[in-house]
Image: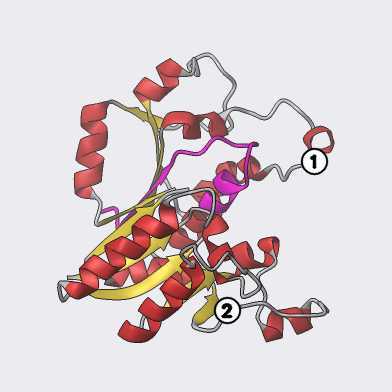
C-alpha cells in the first residue's frame, strides 16, 4: 500500500520547485513506501533534457529519475490527459511512467494514506 | 484531528502563507491540533528576521510567530530551502562563514525528514502550493 503519494505539478527549468519537490519525494522514499504522480506541466519534467547542463546552467536533476528504482520507488505514474495535452507520447523521456486516466488517478488518491502536493 | 501543514509559496508573490495561516487559525480555534507546520520552497522566506514591511501592512512573519507562540506550534523550515535562499540561524551562518544570521525567533531549521514524519503521524497533511 502506498503510504505517501507525491504529486508533482511544476514544470522544470523556470523555477527550482520541481527540483526541490523531487528532493522531498526522495526523502519520503527513505522513510516509507511512496508513489509519484506527474500531472499537468509537471509531466514536462519527464522529457529527456536536450540541452547540455553547461548551456542552461541548471542542475540536471531529472537524471535522478532513473535512480528511483534503486530507492525502491517503483510506482511512478503520469496523467494520460496531461500527456495528450503536452504531446508527450512521442517524446524521448527520461523514464516512462505508467499512464493513468482520471478515473485511475481518483483511485490512486483514495488508495494512498497521505497525499503531498508540490 | 491532527494536521500537518506543508507550505510552499513565497510571502509576497503567493497567497500560500496567508491561506495556510487562516487555515491554521481556524483549525486551532475549532480544537484540532497541528503536529507541525513545515515551510518549504520560497515559504521559508517568511522567517527572514530582516523584513521590515510598512506599519500599515500586515506582517506575515509576526502573525506566524504569534500563532506559533500561542499554540506552541512547531514552525519548521527545510534546511536546503533555507540555505539556497539565505535564511540562516547562528550555527549555519558559522558553518558557511557568513557575517550574520537572520532566522526570526519562533522558527526552527530542520530537514525534509520532518515533513515526512509529520505526514505519516498526522491524520491529514494539507499542502499550500507555490
Please give the label number shown on residue A57.
1
Residue B9 place in picture, x, y as percent? 49, 53
Q: Quadrant of residue B35?
A: bottom left
- Subunit ID for the residue under disc 2: B
Q: Chain of mark 1?
A: A
Would you place residue A89 above or below residue A101 in this image?
above
Of residues A115 and B45, the one nearer the viewer is B45
Q: Is A24 in front, or is A93?
A: A24
Q: Nearer the viewer, mark 2 or mark 1?
A: 2
Nearest the eye: B111 or A34: B111
Asked whether the viewer can see residue A33, the reply is no
Q: Are marks 2 and 1 on the same chain?
A: no
Q: Residue at x 31, y 58 (%)?
A: B126
Q: Residue visible at 49% across and 15% down?
A: A87
Q: Quadrant of the N terminus of chain A?
A: bottom left
| Residue B89 in view | yes
Which secondary structure, mark 2? loop
Q: Does A2 appear in magenta?
A: yes
- In the image shown, does A79 or B57 lie closer to the viewer? B57
Left or right side of B91 for B75 = left
Boundaries of the magenta span? A1-21
Work out whether B67 lies above or below B54. Answer: below
Q: Residues within 10 Å of mark 2 (few under 14, many from 20)?
A: some
Up/down of A99 relative to B9, above or below: above
Give the vertical position of B35 relative to B123 (above or below). below
Residue A80 location (% of width, % of height): 36, 23
Residue B8 % position (x, y): 48, 55
Q: What is the tally of numbered marks visible in this picture?
A: 2
Say which mark, if any, is on residue B104. 2
The residue positioned 36% from the left and 77% from the top of the image is: B67
Assess disc 1: are there few (<14), some (14-19) or many (≥20) residues with their C-alpha within 10 Å of its C-alpha.
Answer: few
Amino acid at each position: 500500500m502506498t503510504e505517501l503519494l507525491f504529486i508533482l505539478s511544476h514544470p522544470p527549468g523556470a523555477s527550482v520547485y520541481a527540483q526541490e519537490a523531487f528532493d522531498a519525494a526522495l526523502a519520503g522514499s527513505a522513510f516509507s513506501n511512496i508513489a509519484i504522480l506527474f500531472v499537468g506541466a509537471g509531466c514536462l519534467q519527464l522529457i529527456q533534457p536536450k540541452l547540455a547542463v553547461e548551456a542552461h546552467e541548471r542542475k540536471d536533476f531529472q537524471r535522478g529519475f532513473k535512480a528511483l528504482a534503486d530507492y525502491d520507488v517503483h510506482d511512478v505514474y503520469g496523467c494520460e490527459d496531461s500527456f495528450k495535452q503536452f504531446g508527450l507520447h512521442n517524446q524521448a523521456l527520461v523514464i516512462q511512467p505508467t499512464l493513468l486516466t482520471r478515473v485511475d488517478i481518483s483511485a490512486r488518491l483514495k488508495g494512498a494514506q497521505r497525499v503531498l502536493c508540490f | 484531528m491532527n494536521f500537518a501543514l506543508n507550505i510552499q509559496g513565497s510571502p509576497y508573490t503567493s497567497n500560500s502563507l496567508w491561506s495556510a495561516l487562516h487555515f491554521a487559525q481556524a483549525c486551532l480555534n475549532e480544537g484540532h491540533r497541528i503536529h507541525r507546520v513545515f515551510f518549504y520552497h520560497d515559504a521559508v522566506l517568511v522567517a527572514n528576521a530582516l523584513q521590515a514591511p510598512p506599519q500599515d501592512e500586515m506582517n506575515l512573519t509576526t502573525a506566524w510567530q504569534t500563532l506559533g507562540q500561542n499554540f506552541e506550534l512547531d514552525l519548521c523550515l527545510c534546511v536546503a530551502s533555507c540555505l539556497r535562499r539565505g535564511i540562516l540561524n547562528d550555527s549555519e551562518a558559522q558553518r558557511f562563514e557568513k557575517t550574520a544570521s537572520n532566522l526570526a525567533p519562533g522558527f526552527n531549521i530542520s530537514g525534509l525528514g520532518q515533513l515526512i514524519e509529520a505526514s505519516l503521524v498526522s491524520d491529514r497533511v494539507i499542502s499550500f502550493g507555490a
